[in-house]
Image (spheres, rainbow, N blue to C red):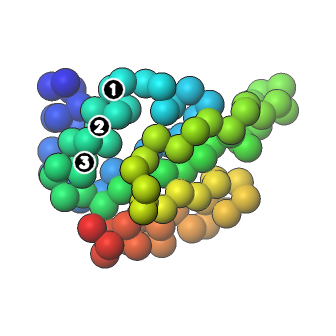
Amino acid sequence: MKLINDGLYNTTVTVVLIGSQTSQRRWVQYEIQQSIARGNGLLGVYVHNIKDQYQRTAPMGANPLPAGYATYDWVLHSGYVNIGTWIDKAYSER
């Protein structure tokens, strides 16, 4: 817990990378809860469409965020270009 709490110190937005198993990770849930409690902006980015070294992709994971928080697909929504805009939007909506 200390590692996560220290990592959230001085932050205003939390970006959750959503992989095939992310929603099942208890520490991810803890980080989301702590981010909400801090008043951080929050968004999720699906990473299942990113190809590995063998050109394979993973299955899409379940969204671990509570209802109402934005999620994006890194590949389909051009994350490399748009991540800054997504973060700014989450910040302004917090």
**What's the residue type where badge 2 is placed?**
Glu
Q: Where, quadrant-wise, is the C terminus in this rendering?
A: bottom left
Query: Looking at this view, is 7 or 28 the one in front?
Result: 28
- Residue 81: horizontal and vertical position, in percent? 61, 66
Left or right of residue 65: residue 30: left
- Residue 66: horizontal and vertical position, in percent? 40, 50
> Crowding at label 2, few (<14), some or many (≥20) Cα neighbours within 10 Å?
some
Badges 1 and 3: C-beta atoms under 8 Å apart?
A: no
Q: Residue at 62% across / 43% down in the picture?
A: 47
Q: Residue at 21% across / 42% down in the picture?
A: 34
Numbered label attached to residue 35: 3
Badges 1 and 2: C-beta atoms under 8 Å apart?
A: yes
Badges 3 and 2: C-beta atoms under 8 Å apart?
A: yes
> Crowding at label 3, few (<14), some or many (≥20) Cα neighbours within 10 Å?
many
- Residue 9: horizontal and vertical position, in percent? 15, 45
Left or right of residue 23: residue 74: right
**What's the residue type where badge 1 is placed?**
Trp
Q: Kindly report the distance in space between the C-alpha atoms of the residues bearing marks 1 and 2.
A: 6 Å
Left or right of residue 77: residue 33: left
Left or right of residue 74: residue 39: left
Numbered label attached to residue 7: none
Element at label 3: helix
Would you identify the image quadrant in which residue 72 lies?
A: bottom right
| Residue that numbered label 2 is attached to | 31
Q: Kindly report the distance in space between the C-alpha atoms of the residues bearing marks 1 and 3.
A: 12 Å
**What's the residue type where badge 3 is placed?**
Ser
Q: Earlier in the sequence, mark 1 or mark 3?
A: 1
Numbered label attached to residue 27: 1
- Residue 32: horizontal and vertical position, in percent? 31, 42
